[in-house]
Amino acid sequence: MRQLMKGNEAVVYGALLGGATHFFGYPITPASEIAHAAAELFPASGRHFLQAESEVAAVNMIYGAAGAGARAMTASSGPGISLMAEGISYIAGAELPCVIVDVQRAGPGLGNIWPEQSDYNAVVKGGGHGNYRNVVYAPNSAQEMCDLTYRAFNLADLYRVTVFLLSDAYVGQMMEPVELPERAIHGERKPWALYGDAQSRGNLISSIHMSTAEQGDHNWHLRAKYDQIASEYTDWQEVDVEDAELLFVAYGISARVAISAAQRLRRTGVRAGLLRPRTLFPFPRARLAELARGTVRDIAVVELSDGMMADDVQLAVLDSATVHRLNWLGGEVPTTDLVVDRARELIPMLTTLR
Amino acid sequence: MVKHAKPGSFYDTFERKGAGQRTTHYCPGCGHGTVHKLIAEAIDEFGVQDRTIFCSPVGCSVFGYYYFDTGNIQCAHGRAPAVATGLRRVNPESIIISYQGDGDLAGIGTAEIIHAANRGENITVFFVNNAIYGMTGGQMAPTTLIGQQTTTTPGGRCEARDGSPIGMAELIDALSTPVFVERVSLADGKRTMKTRAAVRKALRNQIEKKGFSFVEILSPCPVNWKMSPSEARRWIVDTLEHAYPVRNFRDGAGEPRAAAGEPRAAAGAADAASGLWLDDEDLHSLLSSRHDFPDDLRVHDIAEQRVKIAGFGGQGVLSAGVLLANCAITSGLHATWLPSYGPEMRGGTANASVIVSVDEIGSPLVDDPTTLLAMNGPSLDAFERSVVPGGLIIANSSIVPREAERDDLRFYPVPASDIAQELGFLGAANVVMLTAYAALEGFPSPETIRHVIPHSLKRKRLEKLNLRMVDAALDYVAKNPIRLPAGQARR
Amino acid sequence: MGTNYAHVEADLCKGCRLCVETCPHDCLEMGNEINTLGYQYARFVKHTCTACGLCYYACPEPEAITVYRDEPVAEGAVPGGAE
């Protein structure tokens, strides 16, 4: 049964059905509705919600709760995600599972509350100190806010990683019909967690490795884990790529606009398609390279940043296709018209269409 | 018989430190070892070794997990009270010790300790105050005394530059929630035995679920103080204790109270005793809408509707959009609703963008609306130009002072505020506007609106009133057919 | 009737002297030998021990000092590890 709800609210529905038991939050626009819904629904279902004194505290509460074996999560936006960087690094080092939602706004600094996708580097590349990665989902609808949060907890537990949902202000604020997952899932007892009992007494949650050899081994172990995730969990959506000469690449709200632009161009005879990464780490680079070696000649990366994801696209395709950066900054989300116009300005194959 | 020996809550050998190791990493004469011993002894005596989780800080005691044969978690600098909060909220039965130094607790972690204390987390905090950073090489701590030389205050701590030593026990005592606050000292045997009593009390409080206990321990750091262990102990008595009076600040350990951090259920498992944990079926029913979608309301063919609803904040602009989107999904269609949000919602202008389509919706932005519902004058001014040629503008003529300037679209004035006010609720002008739209565009059907209103509007007591708005609006549109604009009349 | 004494584990002592200074009955003193950690270590020397445990609590090391009460000791032996 479909229910109309904000993407931000859908996160909480997906979380509860995905087995989340603990939410530690701190208010920030445009993510606050996640905390609002969690404050209502976690206690109403016998789960736990706590408003922390800061994002620093919130992420460390997650560290403790995840260390105690719980499925724990938080949600924030850029300024809060920056504050959590330390904790996320510790969580990665100690290999704890958790889920964090970043409803991106414009930065740097306080910026404004309108959508940007400029936390890409911070979230996709790690964000804190040290060698680590987060698994990063990129939802582009309220339905995916629900579904990907629902899936995130199993993945986080399986690999003992932080799973991010890298969303944006529009995907968070937008209301759409959402179909809830049918089956509720739950976490299981973890052999490494701290349950305050005899069985778990010997366990240690820590990110310290005093010898260079041990730290090296640990970091290579992490690297191998991320590589394995990359081989198993890279996820993307393709639209009209079979014969595409022009490939739009975009995620989140940008992908919603880009698909409209691609379809509009196709109606004018351009062989346009779209690849939408549903995971940003791991990134669908092999598929992009394959498409670039095939029919695709030009790639239009539509992004609300100065080209952070375009760098990864460029790295994936090297010189087998021309990468064009269609960037908007400051919180402006382009209309379909604007995207089409910008594409026509930048991409030679479209200039004759004027 | 053995009277005093290594407590069983220490590991036999410290394998995490090195194979077969039996000594600590602490310098000769350091206070940490003694505090560790007192804690381990108390854990033994209360029989809580299996239940105990020891939170190691950053600082000299970062390696607490070398020694304590308990659950162990190493925390980021200063964050142990937040980590302890997370542990506590998952498991009400574990015994959680946050062991912190002065840089950790009184410097970088001030916010975390204050708020954990203020929430009354049922945890025990041992704060080892040696007035200096040890691990990093003898730098100034927040608790360093005025004039005290450190590697970052080579000329001595200067109040004008560095502020005054922080009395953490005094700060914690300023909060109403903690149950036990005491400052003790390791300067001599008698004081150490008082420390022992405080450690036991603070731990017992937690076991009895009394709440937050805080023990500040004045502890020697001979190496960084550049003193012998004996001199260091004398310095505590002669100097440190003058700045930090050794005393009990609070012993409110009376009746057990409902300590904070009692979760309603254990993690990931049903807590049948609480009766509050919803099983899968109840969880689903909590989360699921009771909104049904009768087949006879389905719509299979409709041109894409891109509706902009704009007005003052408080005119129900956003909820009119929600009502329309709900009507769309009840009709089996796709819908998106995108609000203006943030500060501008509070008292300023607001608008909602709704797209209704048979097909999946790409961009949810409505920059070229097929319909504009202008709830006030500024909205007409702002959005008239964006409406597609042939589109529709409905204006709340009660307060919109003009007609549309464009002649390539349809314009329909409806005195929505007047109608709503006459029926007794000015706040429902949005429903009048939306119904007028529905009547003119043939979507959504009046039946759909009537069906959806009870599910869509938050204030249930206004249900009947809103349904009357629907009737009144339909009646108005029936009696006032839309006039073709001059431009279209000419054509 | 046994005797009270403190046993100092020589190779676990870091030579801080706190036990020596804390003992109200002067039962401990610093020896001249050097242990495997490189410290001169404390040793038990006198039978006026009451097994009060102050040396044990003053000692920062978990296992360096063990205090015995009413413990049978071979005649003529100096208990406490000051061998």
Image (cartoon, coloured by chain):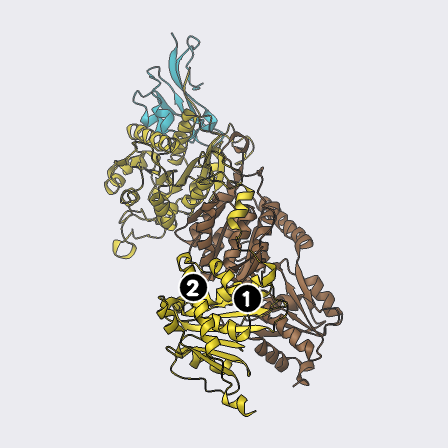
Chain colours: A brown, B yellow, C cyan
Outermost residue toward the bottom?
B490
In the image, which is nearer the foreground, mark 1 or mark 2?
2
Q: Amino acid at mark 1?
A: Thr
Residue type, numbered disc 2: Asn
Q: Where is B254 relative to B86, above or below? A: above
Q: Position of residue C37 (x, y in %)?
A: 48, 32
Name the chain under label 1: B
Residue B162 lies in what quarter of the image? Answer: bottom left
**Which quadrant holds the C terminus of chain B?**
bottom right
Tell me which residue sits at (70%, 78%) in the image. A270
Q: Are marks 1 and 2 on the same chain?
A: yes
Of the numbered discs 1 and 2, the one sitting upstream in the chain is 1
Name the secondary structure under disc 2. helix
Q: Position of residue B404 (x, y in %)?
A: 45, 84
Q: Quadrant of residue B346?
A: bottom left
Which residue is depicted at the point 59% across and 79% down?
A342
Q: CA distance from mark 1 to mark 2?
A: 23 Å
The residue carrying mark 1 is: B336
Which numbered circle lies on residue B466? 2
Left or right position of C83 against A323: left
